[in-house]
Image: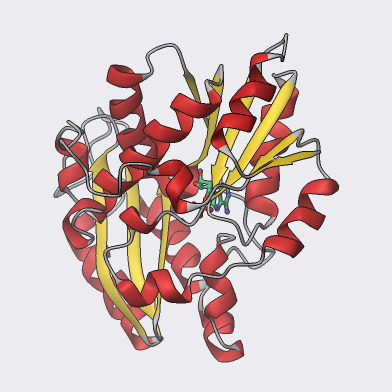
């Protein structure tokens, strides 16, 4: 595996690659979810590029950015066990040579205004900004994203449709711990008691999925929030959406492809998860 920290050197190397490039952007603190994206990328590409960059422009909370785990040495060791060919470890100046300020907001559509978009102002603009820049540098054939961040996939699709229409976006199912908790770099910040409680998020999603169409979503939603809060979580949202339009639905609608998404604080850590219905 080759490691580049300069965007220019990365580009010079990638220009020499003959086959296809699969790209996996990450913020590091790598876990099995990230590694799954890499193996999926290798399954359909000649060369896999992974980036690790804790993108300051997508954090709307300074403490979250400061506390985001940075484990580069461990990450390199983990990547050496995978099919990753190139690791890009840029500095902020490489990604944002003209500063982090966004000159013109991205048009991300309605999907960017709800749920994460509503609770984390500016977050998706920052995500679009960094992925746009990374795609410009890496110029991959395929981009691999995790369904763990379902809304992020919709936002990146909207950005890429305009700025990188040649890139194929590939969604990879969420990798979970044995108890169902979605693997996340943020899980490292949970203490033992919180870690033991955290699987209730996925249990709630599975329970809602099993009741879909059999009972009223409004009632299920109320009971689910009460259950999660009884376990000590603070729920930001628990929403049913049309996964094509991202419109929130009051009730289940079999005519639509749907997803349920949860964001909740457990102690100081904000966790998100979702399930397709
Ligand atoms: P992050 O480092 O959290 O920004 O995530 C980098 C990429 O890994 C994103 O496309 C995430 O959706 C994906 N990802 C994170 N956690 C998981 C998971 N548990 N399963 C699958 N993909 C994941």
Q: Which residue sits at x=66%, y=63%?
A: 177
Residue sitting nearer the eye, 160 or 180: 160
Point out residue 93 in the picture as x, y percentages from the top left corner: 44, 48
Horizontal relation, residue 167 to residue 71: left or right: left
Quadrant the C terminus occupies: top left
Report which quarter residue 111 is drawn in: top left
Q: Most extreme residue toward the bottom, as rendered?
A: 193
| Percent x, y of residue 153 | 39, 37
The N terminus sits in image quarter: top right
The reply, left or right, for residue 225 in relation to residue 27 is left
58, above or below 103, in the image: below
Give the camera-side residue of 148 and 241: 148
Figure check: 227 above or below 179: below
Q: What residue is shown at x 32% (from left), y 39% (from top)?
A: 129
| Above-or-below relation of 152 to 132 | below
Above or below 133: residue 209 = below
How far across and down, in percent of the image, does residue 270 sit?
38, 72
Q: Residue at x 80, y 35 (%)?
A: 83
């Amino acid at each position: 595996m080759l490691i580049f920290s300069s965007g220019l050197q990365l580009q010079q190397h990638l220009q020499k690659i003959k086959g296809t490039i699969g790209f996996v952007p990450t913020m590091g603190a790598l876990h099995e979810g990230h590694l799954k994206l890499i193996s999926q990328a290798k399954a359909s590409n000649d060369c896999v590029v992974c980036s690790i960059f804790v993108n300051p422009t997508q954090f709307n909370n300074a403490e979250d950015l400061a506390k985001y785990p940075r484990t580069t040495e461990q990450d390199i060791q983990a990547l050496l066990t995978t099919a990753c060919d190139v690791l890009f470890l840029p500095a902020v100046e490489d990604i944002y040579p003209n500063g982090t300020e966004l000159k013109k907001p991205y048009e991300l559509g309605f999907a960017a205004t709800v749920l994460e978009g509503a609770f984390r102002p500016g977050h998706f603009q920052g995500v679009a900004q960094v992925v746009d820049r990374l795609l410009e540098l890496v110029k991959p054939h395929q981009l691999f994203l995790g369904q763990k961040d379902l809304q992020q996939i919709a936002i990146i699709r909207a950005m890429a449709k305009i700025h990188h229409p040649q890139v194929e976006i590939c969604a990879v199912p969420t990798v979970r711990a044995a108890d169902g908790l979605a693997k996340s770099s943020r899980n490292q910040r949970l203490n033992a008691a919180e870690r033991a409680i955290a699987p209730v998020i996925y249990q709630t999603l599975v329970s809602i999925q099993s009741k879909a169409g059999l009972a009223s979503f409004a009632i299920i939603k109320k009971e689910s929030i009460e259950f999660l809060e009884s376990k000590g979580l603070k729920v930001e949202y628990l929403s049913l959406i049309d996964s094509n339009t991202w419109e929130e639905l009051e009730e289940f609608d079999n005519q639509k492809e749907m997803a349920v998404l949860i964001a909740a604080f457990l102690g100081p850590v904000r966790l998100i998860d979702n399930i397709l219905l």
